[in-house]
Image (spheres, helix red, strand yellow):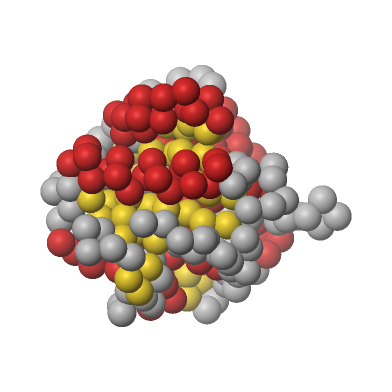
Amino acid sequence: MVDALRPFRHPALFYRGDSEYLDGVVPFLLEGLDRGEPAAVAVPGRNLLLVEKALEDRANEVRLIDMQRAGRNPGAILPSVLLAFAGEHPGPVRIVGEPIWAGRSDVEYPACVEHEALINNAFAGRDLAVLCPYDVGALPPDVLADAERTHPELWGLAGPFTSPRFDPDGVRADFSCPLEPPPAAVERAFDIGQLGSLRGFAEIWAARHGLRRPRRDDFALAIAELTTNSVLYGGGAGVLRLWTQASQVIGEVTDEGTIAEPLAGRVPPSVTTLGGRGLLLVNRLADLVRTYWVPGRTTTRVHFDR
């Protein structure tokens, strides 16, 4: 079923049930292993166990990653899972990545779709393949339609075929919508003069609203990174908003900056580059990061579970 994967390929596997899942994933992995290609599987826990069992004695040749943990924040999947594994191996690599499952929330989903679209940018020209399974029995039709737009190739019972709807840039534009305004939020305008006090302010506020250490420290650090970015790159000033929602504490920073690089915060800069690591750290710290920008205005929102 699987042809030589040269150069970068990013197929979506549409499956229904465990048998179709394994029929798509396992041959993809075994063919790569037979060619000496490193392989990783980053999927939700239940599916991870299915794959591990099906691979039998070859499971120890594959990096097994629980996507429900490693990919809790979709913005962390590229730097912490896909690029981290691919960076260990200069040659051909195969990865099974399942970032979207039925348990994803509505607020997480736009970030998941953006991630799927950006994979095409991150690995363009690389000798690598990322296979993304989609459960057609559990996911709604609009999710499957989005998958057709973020993946250049579709796999299913009919075999591999080119997606006629492939349009990752269009998907990113469609999902780059203004974020819903917060209900009742604590708001503080800041510039360089207030920058030093904001981390402590965010930590005290988070403690009052039930966020415990060490996650409280992570929240305060994320706020410090975002507000520092505003001063350095966002016009020298910004507005910080903090509020709670259900079981989360949420922070948001708005400034007059423009994010020109779509992979900002997802691709680690080279070791010789000064700066460029703040958003990357924020993505690794938070349970969810949402960003909306238009020329001259950027809003970044971080969610932390209490």
Furthest residue in direction right, as rendered: 272
Quarter of the image with the C terminus is: top left
Residue 187, horizontal then vertical, whole percent: 44, 50
Residue 253, horizontal then vertical, whole percent: 50, 55
Q: Residue at 38% of width from left, 52% of height from top?
A: 132
The reply to whether residue 18 is in sight is: yes
Furthest residue in direction top, as rendered: 213
Residue 47, horizontal then vertical, whole percent: 31, 33
Q: Residue at 53% of width from left, 47% of height from top?
A: 32
Q: Is residue 248 above or below residue 120?
A: above
Nearer to me, 239 or 76: 76
Residue 214, horizontal then vertical, whole percent: 54, 22
Q: For residue 141, what is the image quadrant?
A: bottom left
Nearer to me, 159 or 255: 159
Q: For residue 261, what is the image quadrant?
A: bottom right
Q: Is residue 158 above or below residue 217?
A: below
Left or right, 252 with reference to 89: left
The reply to whether residue 109 is in sight is: no
Quarter of the image with the N terminus is: bottom left
Q: Residue at 86% of width from left, 55% of height from top?
A: 272
Q: Residue at 51% of width from left, 56% of height from top?
A: 129
Left or right, 147 with reference to 60: left
Left or right, 184 with reference to 59: left
**Tag count in the figure?**
0
Nearer to me, 246 or 114: 114
